[in-house]
């Protein structure tokens, strides 16, 4: 009798185990699909910027008889302002790694006016960095919906320069385009098609030299011999921290990214 009972228990265990395993397999939780950073995006940003701008004013001396004879007057401006604008880009993800392209255009009001180093009692200089634009390459590492990245590439901007006499007024207004490079880093978190991030950028801009023509109607400057007022060795170092909000437009490559299992 005991032997029959043992045999019955063994048979029940043998035939029941596969059914139990199958039931467990059916009821096992299904993992949610991982987020992919692959796709096009567009967005906006806002934050703060800090700059140091240096240049030499009237680097070319005018001939005798002019009314402005300062040679190589050094200017050093430190300014801060709100910065904001927009960006667009594209990203591709494979496993945890993400690479991308990003372009941005920001408006700033990095302006400063200081007295002349050589004639501080009667002459001031002003500078204003109005726009900053960049085109960069990104490389990053993703943990599902969190992305950390570094970036680097081209940077440019537009600067307005003025010499101001006391009490006459604006002496030599000029605008110049600056070119340079940028590096930065950021972290971004995504939900649905939106992502928000915090980014730091260092930007180096250089403009060489620019001039204000003597016949400029906005200037009271006249120079015998026709030589213009000149701004030389123009350079600006900018640091900015911005909050970025992006909207992912979709994946035009048909979800080609291969995403790792975390």
Image (cartoon, helix red, strand yellow):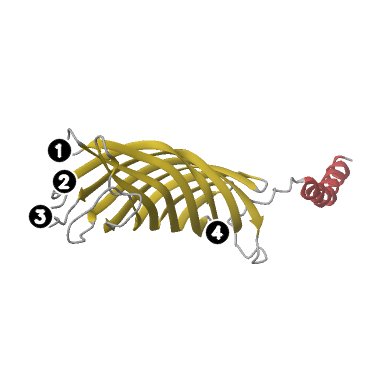
Give the side of residue 97 with respect to residue 42, left or right: left
Mark 1 or mark 3, earlier in chain: 3
Give the numbered dot on residue 119.
1
Between discs 1 and 4, the one toward the N terminus: 4
Measured in 3D between alpha carbons, the distance from the residue under mark 4 to the one under mark 2, in whole angstroms, is 47 Å
Instruction: Please give the name of the residue rendered at 61% of the width and 54% of the height, measured from the top-left corner.
Output: 36
Few, some or many residues within 10 Å of mark 2 (<14, 14–19, 20+) = some
Task: Give the residue pinned by disc 3.
Answer: 64
Callout 1 touching callout 3 (CB < 8 Å): no
Taking depth in this image into account, of 211 and 42 the one nearest to the observer is 211
Of the residues tagged 3 and 2, which is closer to the observer?
A: 3
Task: Provide the secondary structure element on which disc 1 rests.
Answer: loop
Left or right: 11 with respect to 85? right
> Left of 75 or right of it: where is 40?
right
Q: Which residue is mark 2?
A: 73
Measured in 3D between alpha carbons, the distance from the residue under mark 1 to the one under mark 4, in whole angstroms, is 53 Å
Q: Say which element carries label 2.
A: strand
Q: Which residue is mark 4?
A: 91
Q: Nearer the viewer, mark 1 or mark 3?
A: 3
Q: CA distance from mark 3 to mark 4?
A: 60 Å
Question: Residues at badges 1 and 2 in contact (C-beta under 8 Å)?
Answer: yes
The mark nearer the N terminus, 4 or 2, is 2
C-alpha distance separating marks 1 and 3: 19 Å
Could you say where residue 70 lies in the image, as x and y percent from the top left? 14, 47
Q: Looking at the image, do the residues carrying marks 3 and 2 touch, with CB atoms under 8 Å apart?
A: no
């Amino acid at each position: 009798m005991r032997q029959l009972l043992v045999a019955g228990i063994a048979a029940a265990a043998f035939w029941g185990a596969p059914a139990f395993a199958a039931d467990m397999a059916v009821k096992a939780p299904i993992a949610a699909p991982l987020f992919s950073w692959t796709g096009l995006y567009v967005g906006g940003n806002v934050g703060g910027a800090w700059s140091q701008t240096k240049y030499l004013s009237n680097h070319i001396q005018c001939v005798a008889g002019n009314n402005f004879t300062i040679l190589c007057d050094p200017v050093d401006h430190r300014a801060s302002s709100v910065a904001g604008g927009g960006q667009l880009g594209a990203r591709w993800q494979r496993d945890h790694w993400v690479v991308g392209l990003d372009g941005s255009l920001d408006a700033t009001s990095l302006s400063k006016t200081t007295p002349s180093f050589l004639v501080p009692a009667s002459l001031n200089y002003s500078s204003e960095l109005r726009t900053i634009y960049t085109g960069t390459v990104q490389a990053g590492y993703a943990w599902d919906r969190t992305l950390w990245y570094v970036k680097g590439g081209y940077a440019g901007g537009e600067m307005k320069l003025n010499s101001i006499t006391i009490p006459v007024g604006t002496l030599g207004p000029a605008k110049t385009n600056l070119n340079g490079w940028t590096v930065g880093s950021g972290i971004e978190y995504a939900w649905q098609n939106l992502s928000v991030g915090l980014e730091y950028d260092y930007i180096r801009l250089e403009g060489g030299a620019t001039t204000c023509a003597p016949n400029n109607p906005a200037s009271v400057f006249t120079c015998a011999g026709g030589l213009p007022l000149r701004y030389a060795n123009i350079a600006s170092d900018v640091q900015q921290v911005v909050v970025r909000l992006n909207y992912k437009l979709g994946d035009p490559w048909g979800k080609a990214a291969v995403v790792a299992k975390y």
